[in-house]
């Protein structure tokens, strides 16, 4: 076996690519499960190989850079975070295996993914539609309707990751994520019939799986955020989410076993439920490993925060000022995904946290809101949320 070729690259470039790639893999793995799509599963495996190469390169660079104990201590934190990103990658590869190994996906998994706060959709762009012939950066989907295009299939070949300069063409098959409101507009822009997000039976298990998917996604987002902000508070939020996830985890296993004892159909497919739960647990554990760096106050090289600030999606904490347009308004009325281009992950109110808040939750003055979105969306949210924003975050174009 030939040794891998080492190609020198900047640490910043490597870390940015690792985070973006692991994020993309999670979304595509869920899309592969939702549509039981072999091509998407194979795309996840291709990205997993890419992550292996990135991890190999960063380990070589760490070994070369560690000239003394002080430098080694700084690099330890980077390696721990990089290993966590690799663990997320491996978990998504395991999810993709459920498709490629033809295990069979239980309907409750698809229902849970449809019921999750962040929707996934696959559609074909029609000739003459609003998207036909337009570059992604021109239509500004993330900041206008909160929709992110993750992959494009063109002439039987998948393109992922994609750049904002890429032009969308008629006949392209797009895989995207976003809120229900944004997805409806997105379908109209593509000239495609809206997809149904209705769900079937096994309501309790579906709700548990849906919550676990949302919690694992948000835990990873906030874990990286805690590093960017150097915030132990945000890191502790992730620890609380892991505890909440573990409770759902126990209930999901118990529910699945109960269903298996009663159900005469789809018993073999229930195995896919337990396998998916294990994968989501690995992703959540990886998030916990990331915040461990913050909680133990491991010194990180400044290049690390700079790398995270250049990732595709940004995360920020903003304090709501009294009298701002968000004060005393419900999330449903504000429709932040559609009007601003940000998604509310957590609201901190005093000593309490509201995780994945619903549309009926009302923002109040002095709430500290953690949001995710494009650079433009976060910048807009900061300006509208407060007269003078506290220095809780820093984002770069």
Image: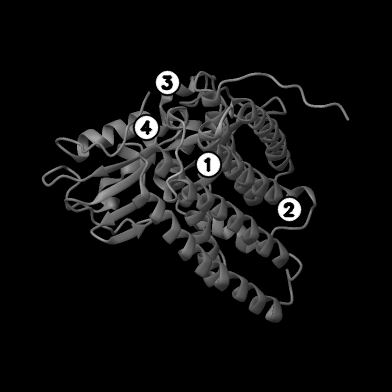
**SS at circle 2:** helix
Q: Is residue 232 above or below residue 124?
A: below
Around disc 1, counting alpha carbons within 10 Å, would you say few (fewer than 14), some (14 to 19), or many (20 or more)?
A: few
| Quarter of the figure with the C terminus | top left
Residue holding disc 4: 143
Dots 2 and 1: beta carbons under 8 Å?
no
Q: How far apart are marks 1 and 4 (CA)?
A: 23 Å
**SS at circle 3:** helix
Residue holding disc 3: 138
Q: Which of 277 and 127 is in front in this view?
A: 277
Task: Give the mark nearest the N terminus, 3 or 2.
Answer: 2
Q: Is residue 196 visible?
A: no
Around disc 4, counting alpha carbons within 10 Å, would you say few (fewer than 14), some (14 to 19), or many (20 or more)?
A: many
Task: Give the mark nearest the N terminus, 3 or 1.
Answer: 3
Q: How far apart are marks 2 and 1 (CA)?
A: 29 Å
Q: Nearer the viewer, residue 213 or 351?
A: 351
Which x, y percent locates residue 202? 57, 71
Which x, y percent locates residue 154? 66, 26
Q: How far apart are marks 2 and 4 (CA)?
A: 34 Å
Task: Give the mark nearest the N terminus, 3 or 4.
Answer: 3
User: Dividing the picture into quarters, in which one does residue 281 lie?
Assistant: bottom right
User: Dividing the picture into quarters, in which one does residue 229 lie?
Assistant: top left
- Identify which residue is drawn at 73% across, 72% down: 265
**SS at circle 4:** helix
Numbered badge on residue 98: 2
* Lateral position of residue 284 relative to residue 342, left or right: right
Dots 3 and 4: beta carbons under 8 Å?
no
Numbered badge on residue 193: 1
Question: In this rendering, which labeled residue sits more in front, label 3 or label 1?
Answer: 3
Around disc 2, counting alpha carbons within 10 Å, would you say few (fewer than 14), some (14 to 19), or many (20 or more)?
A: many
Which x, y percent locates residue 153? 65, 30
């Amino acid at each position: 076996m030939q040794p891998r070729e080492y190609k020198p690259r900047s640490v910043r470039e490597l870390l940015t690519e690792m985070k973006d790639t692991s994020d993309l893999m999670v979304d595509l793995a869920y899309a592969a499960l939702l549509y039981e799509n072999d091509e998407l599963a194979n795309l996840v495996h291709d990205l997993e190989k890419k992550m292996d190469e990135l991890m190999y390169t960063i380990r070589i660079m760490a070994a070369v850079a560690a000239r003394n104990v002080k430098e080694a201590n700084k690099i330890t934190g980077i390696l721990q975070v990089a290993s966590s990103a690799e663990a997320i990658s491996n978990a998504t590869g395991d999810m993709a295996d459920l498709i490629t190994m033809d295990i069979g996906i239980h309907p409750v998994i698809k229902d849970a993914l449809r019921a999750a706060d962040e929707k996934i959709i696959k559609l074909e762009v029609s000739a003459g539609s609003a998207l036909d012939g337009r570059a992604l950066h021109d239509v500004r989907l993330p900041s206008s309707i909160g929709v992110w295009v993750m992959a494009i299939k063109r002439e039987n070949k998948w393109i992922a990751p994609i750049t904002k300069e890429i032009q969308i063409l008629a006949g392209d098959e797009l895989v995207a994520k976003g809120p229900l409101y944004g997805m409806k507009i997105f379908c109209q822009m593509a000239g495609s019939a809206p997809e149904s997000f209705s769900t079937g039976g096994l309501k309790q298990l579906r709700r548990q799986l849906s919550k676990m998917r949302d919690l694992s996604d948000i835990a990873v987002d906030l874990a990286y955020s805690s590093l960017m902000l150097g915030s132990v508070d945000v890191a502790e939020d992730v620890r609380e989410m892991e505890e909440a996830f573990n409770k759902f985890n126990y209930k999901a296993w118990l529910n699945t076993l109960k269903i298996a004892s009663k159900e005469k159909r789809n018993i073999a497919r229930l195995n896919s439920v337990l396998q998916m739960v294990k994968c989501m647990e690995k992703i959540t554990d990886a998030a916990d490993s990331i915040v461990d760096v913050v909680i133990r106050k491991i010194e990180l090289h400044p290049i690390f925060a700079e790398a995270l600030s250049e990732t595709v999606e940004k995360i920020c904490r903003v304090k709501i000022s009294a009298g701002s347009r968000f004060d005393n308004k419900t999330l449903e009325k504000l429709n932040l995904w559609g009007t601003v281009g940000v998604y509310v992950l957590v609201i901190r109110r005093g000593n309490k946290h509201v995780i994945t808040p619903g549309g009926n939750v009302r923002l109040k003055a002095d709430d500290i809101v953690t949001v995710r979105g494009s650079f433009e969306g976060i910048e807009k949210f900061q300006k509208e949320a407060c007269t003078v924003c506290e220095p809780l975050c820093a984002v770069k174009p």
